[in-house]
Image: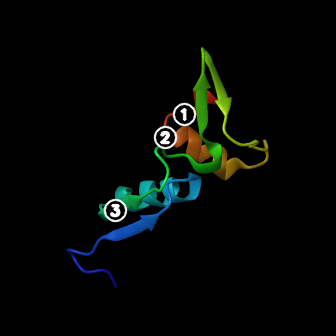
Amino acid sequence: MMKKDDRVCIIGAGLAGLAAALYLTRYNIPVTLIEKDDRAGGLASSIVIGDECIERFYHFICKPDRELIQLIEGVGLKRKL
């Protein structure tokens, strides 16, 4: 059982860490998110080379993965797919 002043610490700002932080904050649970890299996103992040945005790692989203697609829509990133 969480107490009023409890906080949650999430290690890693990849997709799972960001989703966990999102859901916890929706319940007004304070979150500290720790990431070793200089940006969030983990395997789903990208880099810019010149004028091109390129995936840092090979990553794709399957159409049947409705929960992931709903999460992406829920954070306002559907147009980036």
10 Å neighbourhood of mark 3: few (<14), some, or many (≥20)?
Answer: some
Q: Is residue 79 visible?
A: yes
Q: Which residue is mark 1?
A: 77
Q: Is residue 22 above or below residue 24?
A: above
Pinpoint residue 1: horizontal percent, then vertical percent.
34, 85
Residue at 31% from the left image edge and 80% from the top image edge: 2
Residue type at mark 3 is Val
Residue type at mark 1 is Leu
Q: Earlier in the sequence, mark 1 or mark 3?
A: 3
Q: Which residue is mark 2?
A: 75
- Quarter-wise, where is residue 23 in the image? bottom left
Residue at 59% from the left image edge and 50% from the top image edge: 42
Residue at 48% from the left image edge and 43% from the top image edge: 39
Q: Toward the viewer: 33 or 30?
A: 33
Q: Which residue is mark 3?
A: 31
Q: Is residue 37 above or below residue 50?
A: below
Could you give the CA–CA distance between mark 2 and mark 1, rounded to whole angstroms? 6 Å
10 Å neighbourhood of mark 1: few (<14), some, or many (≥20)?
Answer: few
Q: Toward the viewer: 46 or 1?
A: 46
Pinpoint residue 49: horizontal percent, then vertical percent.
61, 22
Q: Earlier in the sequence, mark 2 or mark 3?
A: 3
Residue type at mark 2 is Val
